[in-house]
Structures are given as C-alpha cells and as structure tokens.
C-alpha cells in the first residue's frame, strides 16, 4: 500500500468510526432517558468496538510499514510513536468497557476525545 492509498483507507475508517460513535451517542442518550434501547445500544457499541479494533490494527500496520526507514533513529522514533499511539487507544478502550449504563454514561466523553484524536491525526499524518 502506498502513502496515498494508506491515507485514503485511514480517512475512510475515521469517517466510519464517526458514524458509529454518533449512532452510539444517540442511543446512549435515549437509554439514559429511560427508553428501551439497550439491545440496540449493545449492538451499536459492538460495531463501534469492531470498527475501532480494525482501525487500530490497520493504522499500526500502515504506520510501521510506511515510516520505518534505514536509519536506526527512524526506527526508534516510529517505535516510540507506536507505543504512544497504542497507549492512547488503550485509554479509548477503557471508555468502551463496563456495563451498558457505564458505557452509556461515558459515550459523550469518548466521542469528544476520539474525534479530537482523529482530527489531530488528520492534521498531522493524514493531511495531503
């Protein structure tokens, strides 16, 4: 995969994640308001988890493939960047873990944090 294909693939995944998070937030709001949408929320959160997991795997593979160069310092920088990126993603996973009520209560925070994270990636790594 070349850099342009990688950029487009990751941007497409970002857009799908944003759609999933919007759906989850809407269902979480309805759930918190007492509507019987628990099953739908569970399904939507499951899809978000799957999409986020796929994105993390794709992103890690692409970053490693495209940025590792011949210089030893380049490899060290990429390894450090990946380490930080994995830590950020682990923090997002924590927000997607727990009971339905706990997850529903945190989805707005997750949406805000995840959108800021993806926007930063788009400005720095995925900008044309």
Image: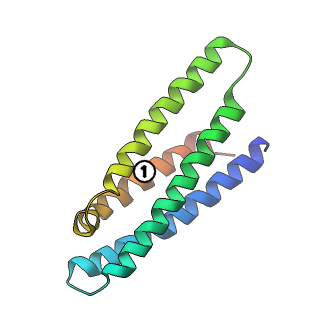
Count of residue discs = 1
| Quadrant hosting residue 100 | bottom left
In percent of width and height, residue 83 lies at 48, 30
Residue drawn 70% across the image and 54% down it: 8
Instruction: Using the rendered image of the protein, determine whether residue 21 is visible from the camera's viewpoint.
Output: no
- Residue placed farthest to the top in the image? 72
In percent of width and height, residue 98 lies at 27, 59
Residue drawn 38% across the image and 60% down it: 111
Label 1: how many Cα within 10 Å (few below 14, some 14–19, many 20+): few
Asked if residue 38 is positioned above or below residue 112 in the image, the reply reads below
| Quadrant hosting residue 95 | bottom left
- Tag 1 residue: 116
In percent of width and height, residue 50 lies at 51, 61
Residue drawn 69% across the image and 25% down it: 68
Instruction: Using the rendered image of the protein, determine whether residue 106 is visible from the camera's viewpoint.
Output: yes
In percent of width and height, residue 54 lies at 57, 54
Residue drawn 63% across the image and 55% down it: 11
**Which secondary structure lies at badge 1?**
helix
Q: Where does the N terminus fall, quadrant-wise?
A: top right
């Amino acid at each position: 995969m070349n850099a342009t294909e990688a950029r487009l693939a990751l941007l497409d995944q970002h857009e799908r994640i944003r759609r999933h998070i919007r759906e989850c937030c809407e269902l979480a709001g309805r759930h918190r308001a007492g509507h019987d949408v628990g099953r739908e929320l569970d399904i939507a959160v499951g899809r978000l988890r799957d999409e986020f997991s796929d994105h993390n795997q794709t992103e890690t593979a692409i970053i490693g493939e495209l940025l590792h160069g011949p210089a030893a310092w380049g490899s060290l920088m990429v390894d450090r960047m990946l380490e930080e990126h994995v830590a950020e993603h682990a923090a997002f996973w924590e927000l997607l873990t727990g009971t339905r009520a706990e997850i529903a209560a945190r989805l707005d925070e997750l949406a805000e944090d995840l959108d800021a994270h993806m926007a930063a990636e788009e400005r720095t790594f995925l900008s044309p």
